[in-house]
Image: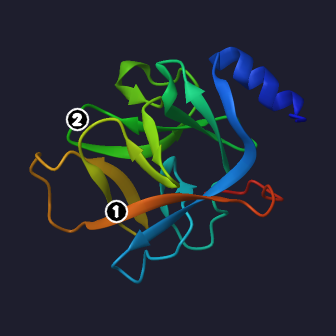
Amino acid sequence: MKIAPFVTSTLALATSVLVSASNHNIRVTSGNPELNGKLLSVSDGAAGVHDAIVPLNVFVTSSDMDLVKMKMLWVWPTGELLALDGARGLQPLIETTPGGRGQSLDAASFLFEGRDITDNHPGSWVAMPKLGGGWSVFWYDGESIITQNYFAVHLTAELASSPPMHTDRA
């Protein structure tokens, strides 16, 4: 298996174990036709569904916390991570630098149930509309009181046909 120098240096810093050298896109499934079948992307640091944005391309490593189950999702080619931001309740899925933004980030507790991506904490994925268009994705614990303008979504990893040719993201 040949891994680009960027990947090996990033993995050495994170002391994670590469699970798949293949890149993946993350597909959103929902009962809402505006979301269903779309690929996850990032706009202004928030992961979600955004028009005319390059889809996220990630590779997966095992988390230091549990080499068997929990995974980390690294963004290709930037080396940033997908992470849940904040305490329990409604946590936005964001793109961040490794070690960035202190204790409130959780980038090491994603689980794969087949190809479905979940989290190690009770809850489920939801999408909420953004002002100005698009949707942001959150992990919702199901207990916190939130506005009722969300849709349940599922996130599924699928092999990317190839790494993106450019990284122009808003």
How did the renderer colour the structure? rainbow
Image location (x, y in percent) of residue 132 = 41, 70
Left or right relative to 94: residue 86 = left
| Residue at 52% in and 24% down | 100
Q: Is residue 78 visible?
A: no
Residue that mark 2 sits on: 88
Mark 1 residue crowding within 10 angstroms, few (<14) / some (14–19) / many (20+): many
Q: Secondary structure at mark 2?
A: loop
Q: Amino acid at mark 1?
A: Ala
Q: Quadrant where the N terminus lies? A: top right
- The amino acid beneath tag 2 is Arg
Q: Which mark is residue 34?
A: none
State the residue at coordinates (40%, 65%): 135
Distance Cα–Cα, label 1 vs label 2: 16 Å
- Kindly identify which residue carries mark 1: 127
- Residue that lies at the very extreme toward the bottom in this rendered image: 33
Give the percent coordinates (x, y) of residue 86: 31, 33
Q: Identify the residue shown where x is 20% and y is 45%.
A: 141
Is there CB contact under 8 Å for labels 1 and 2? no
Q: Position of residue 161 (x, y in %)?
A: 78, 64
Q: Position of residue 149 (x, y in %)?
A: 21, 68
Instruction: Answer with mark 1 or mark 2, whichever residue precedes in sequence.
Output: 2
Q: Is residue 131 left or right of residue 161?
A: left
Q: With respect to residue 65, does 131 lie above or below?
A: below
The structure residue drawn at horizontal position 53% and vertical position 18%, both measured from the top left corner, is: 64
Q: Tell me if 42 is positioned left or right of 150 in this view.
A: right
- Identify which residue, 89 or 156, lies in the foreground: 156
Q: Using the image as rendered, state which of residue 138 and residue 130 is in the foreground.
A: 138
**Left or right of 148 in this view: 112:** right
